[in-house]
Image: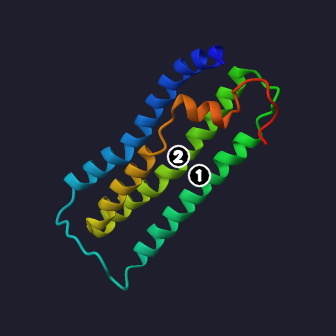
């Protein structure tokens, strides 16, 4: 278990840096499109706003797919794989999860460019907060990859 934690610590620094970079992209895009906006306004409810329906659909689909694909990738890791292989698979699954969480935020930025409605930038902020809740920790990786010793499979 000590070897696992030592190997994970270097991996953890790398994956957290990538996670922060992925979280920064919607923030940077949101700031850029806000600075280039002509006349932004805030309209919370517009019954005829089909773009809001599209944004909500993209958000729900992104959240659902991120979780499902993450679990699917983790379940596909063979129990007898080496620690390096398990960490590589975890990193691929985690990055895919973050990309599927990032896509709705970028879609909201594009819709903001079209509509100038500040509500879409607020939604981007909410998505970034949600993404920050999925920060990786040693304990999460050890639990997700079942690295607590030689005791069986994922259950």
Could you say where residue 105 lies in the image, as x and y percent from the top left?
Answer: 42, 55
In this rendering, would 91 be left or right of 26? right
Farthest left residue in view? 39
* The quadrant where residue 41 appears: bottom left
**Residue in view at x 30 percent, y 59 percent:** 121
Q: Which mark is residue 1?
A: none
How far apart are the alpha carbons under marks 1 and 2? 8 Å
- Between residue 65 and residue 9, name the one nearer to us: 9
Look at mark 2 in the image and give the residue it sits on.
99
**Residue in view at x 37 percent, y 79 percent:** 49
In this rendering, would 78 be left or right of 122? right
Look at mark 1 in the image and give the residue it sits on.
66
**Residue in view at x 37 percent, y 65 percent:** 111
Farthest bottom residue in view? 47
Q: Are marks 1 and 2 in contact (CB under 8 Å)?
A: yes
Q: Which quarter of the figure is the N terminus placed in? A: top right
Q: Nearer the viewer, mark 1 or mark 2?
A: 1
Q: Circle 1 — which element?
A: helix
Q: Vertically, is 57 above or below 74? A: below
């Amino acid at each position: 278990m000590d070897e696992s934690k030592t190997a994970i610590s270097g991996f953890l620094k790398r994956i957290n840096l990538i996670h922060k970079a992925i979280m920064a992209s919607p923030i940077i895009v949101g700031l850029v499109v806000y600075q280039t906006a002509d006349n932004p306004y805030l309209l919370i409810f517009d019954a005829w706003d089909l773009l809001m329906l599209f944004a909500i659909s993209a958000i729900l689909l992104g959240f659902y797919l991120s979780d499902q694909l993450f679990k699917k990738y983790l379940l596909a890791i063979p129990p007898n794989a080496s620690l390096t292989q398990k960490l590589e698979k975890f990193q691929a699954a985690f990055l895919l999860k973050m990309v599927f969480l990032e896509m709705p935020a970028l879609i909201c930025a594009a819709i903001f460019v079209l509509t100038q409605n500040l509500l879409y930038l607020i939604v981007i902020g909410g998505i970034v907060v949600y993404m920050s809740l999925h920060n990786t920790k040693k304990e999460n990786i050890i639990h997700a990859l079942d690295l607590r010793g030689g005791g069986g499979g994922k259950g």
